[in-house]
Amino acid sequence: MDQIEAATLFKTRVVVARHGEMDRAKWWNTNKALSSTGTMVFKRGFPRTHSFAQARAVFAVAKHRCDEHFNPPKSATLWRLPQDVEERLEAAREGWLDDASSWSEFFDAVAAPQERDLASLMQRLGLADAGDVAAAKDLRRSIEGRSIPLPGTFASTRRDLALLALGFDKGGDGLVVPYARLADL
């Protein structure tokens, strides 16, 4: 099975976080925090790791906004994954901070993307493939219109992650929260 890699999870969150800002999809109340404007602000306090600080700030806002909007029990969202996945991400992040400059090309690509849609940006950055995009087209809003349920249960695969991210674009002009049920333990 194609398990979620920590770097892929982090990059996917950064791309969705940037896409959801007020100057793009308007899903959460951050404005250009992951753009060059945000870099100018964050670089003052975090000269070496500003990109990671920017990302962490927008992640917190996005998670809070999504939890307010739709917070299903016993489910995974892009911002709230199973504990083992989150722990792998946190462990990897510590190492990335030691070599933050190696991430600059990625953060620069996300800061001012030419693509207006999330799927094209994720494909260009290697975070989604044509199969993921095709599967996302089959996702539908729930009856109440606030969420996008993924089929089946969350298996911590790269495809699950891609669909949790791509599902955000199904909201049109508003926020919808893609989620997948967790298997009973």
Image (tube, helix red, strand yellow):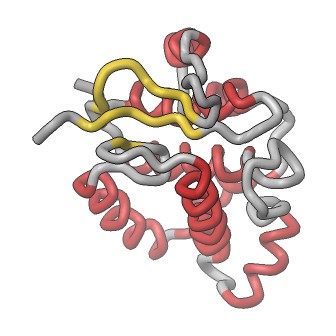
The location of residue 45, given as percent across then percent down, is: 70, 90
- 152 over 19 or under it: above or below: above
Counting labels gives 0
Outermost residue, front side: 144
* 41 lies left or right of 18: right
Is residue 117 visible in the rendered image? The answer is yes
Task: Check the image and report above or below for 2 versus 88.
Answer: above
Q: Is residue 159 above or below residue 174?
A: above
Residue lying farthest to the bottom in this orientation? 45
Quick one: 10 or 153, which is closer to the camera?
A: 153
Residue 79, x across and y down, in percent: 48, 52
Looking at this view, is 22 or 37 the one in front?
22
Q: Give the residue at x 64% y 65%.
A: 61
Looking at the picture, tell me which residue is in the foreground, 43 or 89: 89
Q: Is residue 102 left or right of residue 153?
A: right
* Residue at image location 47% in from the left, 27% down from the top: 149
Residue 26 in the figure: left or right of residue 57: right
Residue 101 shows up from this direction? no
Q: Residue at x 35, y 47 (%)?
A: 73
Q: Position of residue 132 (x, y in %)?
A: 51, 18
Locate residue 117: give its quadrant: top right
Q: x, y percentage for residue 10?
A: 49, 52
Q: Is residue 144 left or right of residue 150?
A: right
Residue at 86% over, 35% down: 114
